[in-house]
Amino acid sequence: MITGKSYVKSLFFINFEVTQLNLNFIMNTIIYLVLGLIIGATGIYVYFTLGGKKKLRKFEEANAKKIAAAERKLSDAEHKASIAENKLKEKILDAKNKALDIIEEAKNEERNMRRQLEKQESRLISKEDSLDQKATEVEKLKENILKKEESLKVQEEKVEAMYKEQEEKLSEITKLSQEEAKEMLLSNVERDYKDEIVNHYKSMVKDAKEDANKEAKNIIAQAIQKISSDVTSESTQTIVDLPNDEIKGRVIGREGRNINAFEHLTGVDVIVDDTPNAIMISGFDLVRRYIAKRSLEKLVEDGRIQPARIESVVEETKAEVHQMMKEFGEKATYEMGITGLHPDLIKIIGRLRFRTSYGQNVLKHSMEVGLIAAHIAAEIGADVHTAKVAGFLHDIGKAVDHEIEGSHALIGAEILKKYGLSKEIIHAAEAHHEEVPMDTAEAMIVYAADAISASRPGARRETITTFLKRLQELEDLAKSFKGVEKCYAIQAGREVRVFVKPDAIDDLGATKLSHEIARKIETELAYPGTIKVQVIRELRAIDVAK
């Protein structure tokens, strides 16, 4: 497309070419005229100087030929100039036509743009009018809603007043309060429809349990089947076997210097009593106790028991145990498929190998929880990595809980924060004992996985005193309810059977009692796994034929 600027440039160059042609023509004409004058003057000069007419005639002929040739050249130049001028006029005419076309095209585009702008402007004006109209309608609607809301409030107040008035009249007529009337109504319904309520309640509970537990049991069973672990529990030994009782004297040393040095270096208490061929090591720090046990076994095997040798062996054993802790931690994280943990955190994980809880090794328990949590998370669509790492590290606080005050769950959360783990992992590990609210699905999964690992058969052991105390507390709690005649804790405390007085509690009351006992156990007792509450109501009619 030729613009106005290019059109002006083309006109300038055309005028320049015409001017140049005219100048060339004028210059040629002047040159030929000057040549003619010079030749004529020369001829006259020769004629008058030499005085020869013949020569003058020849000169004039030659001069005439030159003038004729010059005139022909001049005619040719004029003809060429005329042709050039015609071509130039044609170019100028074409340029003018093109310029007119461009101007016309530009005018057409301008007209089209104006029409489009006018259409857009009309549309915008139309939309603006529509929006104004809608805003007016919304404002009217808002006013109507506010009026209706105020009307509803008035009506609600009237209804509330009528309801209160009816309650007062009903109370005056029946001489009963609302709560008393409610209790009377429930009592009458309970009396008249007791059997149906019991059957309906049992049916609802059964259906709800079947529907709710079916999928959960399936997921948990799959998770447990996918991991392989020993059923027997592991306990760190605190007794050192001796080849004979004579070694005890050498362990004690002269005036007790050997045993004092040993206790000072290891941080444990060594108990030498009448137990044949054995020495007891006492201490709440399991790592120190293990170092003491290994050191004493080496000293007994070597036979050289003296303060200098004791110090050397204890230092050597400490280095071995710290290396063992690092290896245990690295092996556990490798088996779990967890990477990117801080080396110091891996070493703390290795300390759990020397820690037990109710006879269950904490490191193996942590690995179980991590694997179970990962499988459950995969089944229900939660974050598998978060569940696995949180389950694996949920008991990390037990490695140092004897050194720091506080629960192991909260201590573990601080350790995980220190080594830069994510907030989701820290929360899931911190909440596994419900000391903080469980806000994520992964936290609930870790809580469930911890309970599964701890409550499986053979996972944990209790002392006989603790076990009997727990059973006694369970029986006493059930006996505290009115109408209970006898109570027995069976199945190692996983079931409690409550016998009630048949004349004091009916069938519906027995159902309600089982529910109340179960809720009270949940709120007041600490126990692994679940406890089944079975309320038994038996009415025996006995007579004797004489």
Image (cartoon, rainbow, N blue to C red):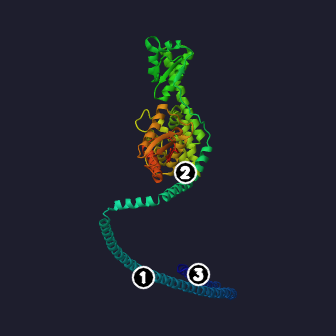
Determine which quarter of the picture holds residue 485: top left
**Whether residue 361 can be seen here:** yes
Between circles 1 and 3, the one closer to the viewer is 1
Position of residue 452 measured from the top left corner of the image (x, y, whole percent): 54, 43
Q: CA distance from mark 1 to mark 3?
A: 62 Å
Report the residue marked by disc 1.
129
Report the residue marked by disc 2.
383
User: Up-down: is 244 above or below 523?
Assistant: above
Report the residue marked by disc 3.
17
Position of residue 312 measured from the top left corner of the image (x, y, whole percent): 51, 19
Determine which quarter of the picture holds residue 11: bottom right
Q: Amino acid at mark 1?
A: Asp
- Find numbered disc 1 in the image and state the secondary structure of the residue it sits on: helix
Q: CA distance from mark 2 to mark 1?
A: 53 Å
Between circles 2 and 1, the one closer to the viewer is 2
Task: Report if the CB atoms under discs 2 and 3 are less than 8 Å apart.
Answer: no
Which of marks 1 and 2 precedes in the sequence? 1
**Left or right position of 436 against 37:** left
**Left or right position of 386 against 227:** left
Between circles 2 and 3, the one closer to the viewer is 2
Query: Dot 1: within a 10 Å radius of its alpha carbon, few (fewer than 14), some, or many (20 or more) residues?
Result: few
Determine which quarter of the picture holds residue 162: bottom left
